[in-house]
Image (cartoon, rainbow, N blue to C red):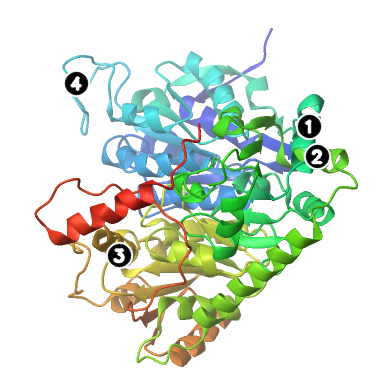
C-alpha cells in the first residue's frame, strides 16, 4: 500500500518545491532558494500558512511590489545561470495582475521563475468573491488567464489530485534551457487550504539534470566547412553562451581560429573587453568595430543568440550579399533563424565540437590586423567618452566611465531601460562574464533596483552597482525598502536627466518633437530615496560623484548616489540603425524630414528569413 501524508495543497506545494534540485556537470544545488510573497485573502491562509509551517524548508522573503519581486527572482536566476530560482506568490486580483509584467520579462529573457497567484473559489460557493472578474461568457475565467500568453507553462489547480502532474510539468519547463521562462500555477484559495492524502514519494528529493545536448556530427562538419571557407567570419555571442558557461570554450575557439567575437546585450561579458578577439557590442547600440565587421561578414556564427532587432540593426547590419548563418543554439526556433545552418546543441558542447572540426584553421593575418585596428579606434573613442567633459555637469558617458573605474573586476552593473543600456552596451568594459547585467529583452523600466536586489542575493560577495535614470526610478523604487530592511547592500547610481532621455531622442528623430518625454520634477528623488531608508549622497560634479561612489562602495549599507547630468552630449555613434516607423504623411516639417531619413535608412534592410 502506498504510504501517504495528509497535507493541505499549500503545504504540499511548499514541501515539493523545497526538495527540487538541479545538476549540471556534477554540480548539484537546490533549485528554489525561497519564495517571495505579498499576502492577501487569496493566498494568506493557504500558501502563507504553509510558508510559516515549513519555512525552514523553503524560506519566505517579503517584497513591497508584486512586479518587483518577479524582477528580483529574475535577477537571482540569471546570476545563477538559470540553475536556481525563486517562487513568487500573491493574492488573486491586483496582486496577481501586477505580476504579469514580470512574467513577460522572464519569458522573453528565458529566465525561470515560478508564479503562484491565488485564484477565486474553485467550488464557487462564495462567488463572486472580492476582486473576482466576472466574465459572463464563462465562470472558469479569472484574471489569472492573463498569464497564459506570457507563461511557458500555465495551469489552474481546481482539485488536489491535479497538483502532482502540474508540479512535475512546471519543473520540466523551468529546468529546460530551451523552454524555460515564467511558469504559472493558479491556486484557487479554497483549494490551497484543502487537505489531501499525498503519496510520500511526491516529496522525495528529486534531481533535474540539465543536460548538454551535443550537435549532429554531420552538421558540425558542414558548419566547419562554411567557417573554413569564410574570408571574413564573425561570431555573435548571446546570453546562451553565458548561461551554458561556455565562455572559456568560446575564448579557446576564438583564439584558435582568430574569428572575432561581437556581443549582444545578454552576451556582453563572454570575453573580457581587452581580449584580442573581442570587438565589443553589436547592432543598434554596438561599437563601430563590431558593426563594420558585421557589414562585411560572409559567415556569421551565432552562439546562444535570438537575433533581436537591436542585435541585427533591424536586419540592416549583416549587409553582405550572400551572407550565411550558422546558429548554435539549444532552442530550435533560434537555431533556424535567417535560414541558418542549425546546430541545435548546448553552446559549450557545440563550440568544443566546432573547435575540434576546425583544428589547424585560422583566419588570414590581414583580417586579424584589420580587427585590431578597428578595435583600437573604438577604444580611443571610449577613452574620449570617459574623459572629463569640462562642463558644469558631467555627461552620462563620463558617469559610466567613473562607475567602471571604481567598480572591481567581479562587481556587477545592473540596468534595464532608457538611454543607459545603449550607452553601457557600447561603453562598459566588462571583465567578468557575470559582471554585466542589463535586462534588454523586455527593456522594462523599474527593473533596475528590484533586479539588483536579486543579483545581490545570488552573489553576496560581489558589489552590485544599479544604474537607473530618474524616469525609471519613478516607475519602481520600493525595493529600496526591502534592501534596507533585509540588510542587502546595493549601490544605486540615480542619474537625474529630467525626463525619458532615450525616448526623448527617439521622439525627436521621428519628428514627434519630444512630446511627453521631458519633465521638470516637482520633488526631490534623493529625498525620496532617503525616506525609503537608503543612505543618500549627492553630487553635481564628476569629482564629487567619484568621491561619493567610493564612499558608497565602501559602505555596508544600501546607498543611493544622486547625480545631475548634462544631456547635451551623447555617446559615440554606433553607425547602425534601428527601425522605428515614421508617420508617412504629416503637415509638420519635423515629421516629413524624419520620414525622408527613414525611407533612406530602410534601403539598408535585407530580407533575412
Residues at circles 2 and 4 in contact by the CB criterion of under 8 Å: no
Relative side of 203 to 486, left or right: right
- The residue lying at 63 percent from left, 35 percent from top is 177
Residues at circles 4 and 3 in contact by the CB criterion of under 8 Å: no
* Residue 296 disc label: none
Q: Secondary structure at mark 4?
A: loop
**Cα–Cα gap, marks 1 and 4:** 53 Å
Query: Which badge, 1 or 2, is on the more N-terminal residue?
Result: 1
Residue 131 visible in the snapshot: yes
**Cα–Cα gap, marks 3 and 2:** 43 Å
Q: Residues within 10 Å of mark 1 (few under 14, many from 20)?
A: many
Residue 504 appears in which quarter of the rendering? bottom left
- The residue lying at 23 percent from left, 14 percent from top is 138
* Residue 135 disc label: 4
Q: Secondary structure at mark 2?
A: helix
Q: Which residue is mark 1?
A: 220
Amino acid at each position: 500500500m502506498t504510504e501517504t501524508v495528509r497535507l493541505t495543497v499549500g503545504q504540499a506545494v511548499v514541501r515539493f518545491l523545497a526538495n527540487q534540485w538541479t545538476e549540471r556537470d556534477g554540480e548539484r544545488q537546490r533549485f528554489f532558494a525561497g519564495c517571495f510573497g505579498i499576502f492577501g485573502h487569496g493566498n494568506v491562509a493557504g500558501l502563507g500558512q504553509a510558508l510559516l509551517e515549513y519555512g525552514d524548508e523553503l524560506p519566505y522573503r517579503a517584497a513591497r511590489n508584486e512586479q518587483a519581486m518577479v524582477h528580483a527572482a529574475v535577477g537571482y536566476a540569471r546570476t545563477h545561470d538559470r540553475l536556481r530560482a525563486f517562487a513568487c506568490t500573491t493574492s488573486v486580483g491586483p496582486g496577481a495582475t501586477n505580476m504579469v509584467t514580470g512574467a513577460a520579462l522572464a519569458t522573453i529573457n528565458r529566465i525561470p521563475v515560478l508564479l503562484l497567484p491565488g485564484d477565486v473559489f474553485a467550488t464557487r460557493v462564495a462567488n463572486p468573491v472580492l476582486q473576482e472578474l466576472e466574465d459572463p461568457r464563462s465562470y472558469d475565467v479569472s484574471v489569472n488567464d492573463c498569464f497564459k500568453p506570457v507563461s511557458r507553462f500555465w495551469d489552474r489547480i481546481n482539485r488536489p489530485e491535479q497538483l502532482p502532474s502540474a508540479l512535475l510539468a512546471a519543473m520540466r519547463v523551468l529546468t529546460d534551457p530551451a523552454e524555460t521562462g515564467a511558469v504559472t500555477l493558479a491556486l484557487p484559495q479554497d483549494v490551497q487550504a484543502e487537505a489531501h492524502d499525498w503519496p510520500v514519494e511526491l516529496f522525495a528529493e528529486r534531481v533535474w539534470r540539465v543536460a548538454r545536448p551535443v550537435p549532429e556530427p554531420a552538421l558540425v562538419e558542414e558548419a566547419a566547412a562554411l567557417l573554413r571557407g569564410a574570408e571574413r567570419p564573425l561570431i555573435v555571442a548571446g546570453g546562451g553562451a553565458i548561461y551554458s558557461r561556455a565562455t572559456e570554450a568560446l575564448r579557446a575557439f576564438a583564439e584558435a581560429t582568430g574569428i572575432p567575437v561581437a556581443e549582444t546585450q545578454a552576451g556582453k561579458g563572454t570575453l573580457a573587453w581587452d581580449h584580442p578577439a573581442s570587438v565589443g557590442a553589436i547592432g543598434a547600440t554596438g561599437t563601430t568595430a563590431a558593426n563594420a565587421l558585421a557589414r562585411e561578414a560572409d559567415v556569421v556564427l551565432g552562439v546562444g543568440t535570438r537575433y533581436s532587432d537591436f542585435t541585427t540593426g533591424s536586419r540592416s547590419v549583416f549587409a553582405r550579399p550572400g551572407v550565411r548563418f550558422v546558429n548554435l543554439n539549444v532552442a530550435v526556433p533560434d537555431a533556424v533563424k535567417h535560414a541558418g545552418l542549425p546546430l541545435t546543441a548546448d553552446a559549450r558542447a557545440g563550440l568544443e565540437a566546432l573547435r575540434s572540426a576546425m583544428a589547424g584553421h585560422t583566419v588570414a593575418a590581414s583580417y586579424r590586423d584589420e580587427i585590431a585596428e578597428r578595435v583600437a579606434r573604438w577604444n580611443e573613442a571610449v577613452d574620449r567618452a570617459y574623459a572629463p567633459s569640462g562642463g558644469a555637469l558631467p555627461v552620462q558617458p563620463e558617469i559610466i566611465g567613473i562607475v567602471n573605474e571604481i567598480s572591481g573586476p567581479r562587481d556587477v552593473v545592473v540596468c534595464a531601460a532608457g538611454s543607459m543600456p545603449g550607452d553601457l552596451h557600447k561603453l562598459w568594459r566588462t571583465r567578468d562574464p557575470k559582471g554585466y547585467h542589463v535586462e534588454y529583452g523586455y527593456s522594462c523600466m523599474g527593473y533596475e533596483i528590484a533586479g539588483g536586489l536579486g543579483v545581490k542575493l545570488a552573489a553576496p560577495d560581489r558589489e552590485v552597482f544599479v544604474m537607473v535614470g530618474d524616469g525609471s526610478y519613478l516607475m519602481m523604487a520600493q525595493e529600496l525598502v526591502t534592501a534596507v530592511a533585509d540588510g542587502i547592500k546595493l549601490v544605486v547610481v540615480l542619474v537625474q536627466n529630467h525626463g525619458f532621455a532615450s525616448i526623448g531622442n527617439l521622439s525627436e528623430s521621428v519628428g514627434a518633437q519630444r512630446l511627453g518625454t521631458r519633465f521638470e520634477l516637482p520633488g526631490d528623488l534623493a529625498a525620496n530615496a532617503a525616506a525609503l531608508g537608503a543612505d543618500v549622497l549627492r553630487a553635481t560634479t564628476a569629482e564629487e560623484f567619484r568621491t561619493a561612489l567610493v564612499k558608497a562602495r565602501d559602505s555596508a549599507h544600501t546607498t543611493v548616489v544622486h547625480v545631475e547630468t548634462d544631456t547635451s552630449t551623447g555617446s559615440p555613434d554606433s553607425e547602425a540603425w534601428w527601425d522605428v516607423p515614421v508617420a508617412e504623411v504629416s503637415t509638420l516639417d519635423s515629421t516629413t524630414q524624419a520620414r525622408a531619413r527613414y525611407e533612406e535608412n530602410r534601403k539598408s534592410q535585407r530580407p533575412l528569413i
